[in-house]
Amino acid sequence: MGKLIVNTKVKKSKINRNIYGHFSEHLGRCIYNGIYVGENSEIPNVNGMRTDVVEALKHIRVPVLRWPGGCFADEYHWKDGVGPKNSRKKMINTNWGGVVEDNSFGTHEFLEFCRQVGCEPYINGNCGSGTVQEMSEWVEYMTFDGQSPMTEWRKQNGREEPWKVKYFGVGNETWGCGGNMRPEHYLDLYRQYQSFLKNYGENKIFRIASGPSVGDYHWMKTMMEYAGKLMDGITLHYYTVPGEWKNKGSATKFTEQEYYITLKKALYMQELVENHSRIMNYYDPDHRVGLIVDEWGTWYDVEPGTNPGFLYQQNTMRDAIVAALSLNIFNQHSDRVVMANIAQMVNVLQSVILTEGEKMVLTPTYHVFDLYRAHQDATLVESFATGEMIGTEDAQVPNLNVSASVDDHNVLHVTAANLSADAAEPIECDLLGMKPNQVSARVLTGGAMDAYNDFDHPDTVKIQNFQSIETMENRLKFTMPACSVMEITVAE
Ligand code: AHR
């Protein structure tokens, strides 16, 4: 018998809606075909943006979207991506398959996509191969309302009003593809570049520094010590890779051992967030600077027969559990984590959507974002799970994982995952501080850890209403199916 304890009397941090953010890069079929098909496409679109994708993203209330990379960001020159499309410069996408990038999706198109989805833009500037002037002028081009060469150019390119752009990143993975820098070097570059990101009118830039890879605590310490006062956020990147980088493992064909290894590696996010937060707490005890996990998710070998540079992978119930664990961890640490961006939105790595021509399919990970959407901007309340350790000899994980929040209408939302590949779990959920008068629940399960949706079987894994909950004085009793994610809603 597993136990979940939820105490609505212990209110904690506000869960920033941006924890439910996404990431889109000029990589494989994420932007082209995934998001953007062009105005003349046969695929239904508005101003070139796929209508089916936009509608699906609106449903899960995507709050913020990062663009244009990733590694691509540090070789992207934004001026090549504005103006008449037929005169935009073409470039080679050196990081991702060496394909030609025709720059037909640029600043105007990205901001139009955000408008249609109803999310905030998060733009990642080029610090690795771009100049200070170039970065500074990008902000001026997008957000300045007065008279200047950049605003005149924007108007000539069809946009009279400035946009509101809050989130701006100074470089990506500057320890790796963004310049292979030492933290001591990037630190000074960060201080310099951010000085020229100006606030125009009402638009206030939220400055985001390129942070550590995984457990590089020296990077975090250096940045916080010498630039903490000049930033609003700092990034952390961590991917869940079941195998080695050269042999990561298949997205759909895996053993129980690989399943539990994947979950154990996903849970490492908790240790990373806590350790980096400790360093941040020392230099920023007031929690002014946010931790932004702007790349997270599973990374497997590409689907057989697809371009290795395109990072296209399928998505199973294993990915749904990874998403559930990760989002629970971010919720539970929302006193420091203010944004997270799953990598990536469409057709790349742990996508919420896959497309093929005019077809679209929603992945198990998409459905987890659906189950969790009520947490956005709600107040985290105390919750924990007491279950047992399960798995294989090398990969032991707790069988249950949970987070809970109370929204503005005093409605409680509990999200929980049963990690067991094959055992249903009877649960007692104790509710402290609340009488469960109205209870409803939804469950995501596919009948197997490797169940997935494809274009011929789009509903193998889908959300279902869950009726079998016994309600007592201060307790709910139910049985969670094996390898499942649930959302339980409770009102007094
Ligand atoms: O998401 C794919 C790549 O992973 C990104 O471009 C890069 O930032 C990271 O290494």
Image: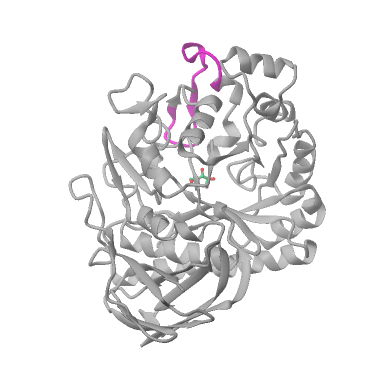
Whether residue 192 is situated above or below residue 16 in the rendered picture: above
Q: How many marks?
A: 0
Tell whether position 443 is magenta.
Answer: no
Nearer-the-camera pick, 417 or 395: 417
The image quadrant that residue 272 belongs to is bottom right
Residue 146 visible in the shown view = yes
- Residue 126: image location, x then y, percent: 64, 34
Quadrant location, the N terminus: bottom left
Q: What span is in magenta?
A: 81-99
- Residue 486: image location, x then y, percent: 37, 68
Question: Is 293 left, or right, of 473 in this rendering?
Answer: right
Query: Residue at 55% of width from left, 64% of height from top?
Result: 331
Whether residue 457 is situated above or below residue 216 in the rendered picture: above
Nearer-the-camera pick, 96 or 329: 329
Whether residue 265 is situated above or below residue 127 in the rendered picture: below
Residue 258 visible in the shown view = no
- Residue 434: image location, x then y, percent: 50, 79
Tell whether position 92 is magenta.
Answer: yes
Query: Residue at 45% of width from left, 46% of height from top?
Result: 344
Q: How is the image coloured?
A: one colour
Query: Residue at 69% of width from left, 26% of height from top?
Result: 134
Question: Is 217 left, or right, of 344 in this rendering?
Answer: right
Question: Is 466 left, or right, of 221 in this rendering?
Answer: left
- Residue 78: image location, x then y, percent: 59, 26
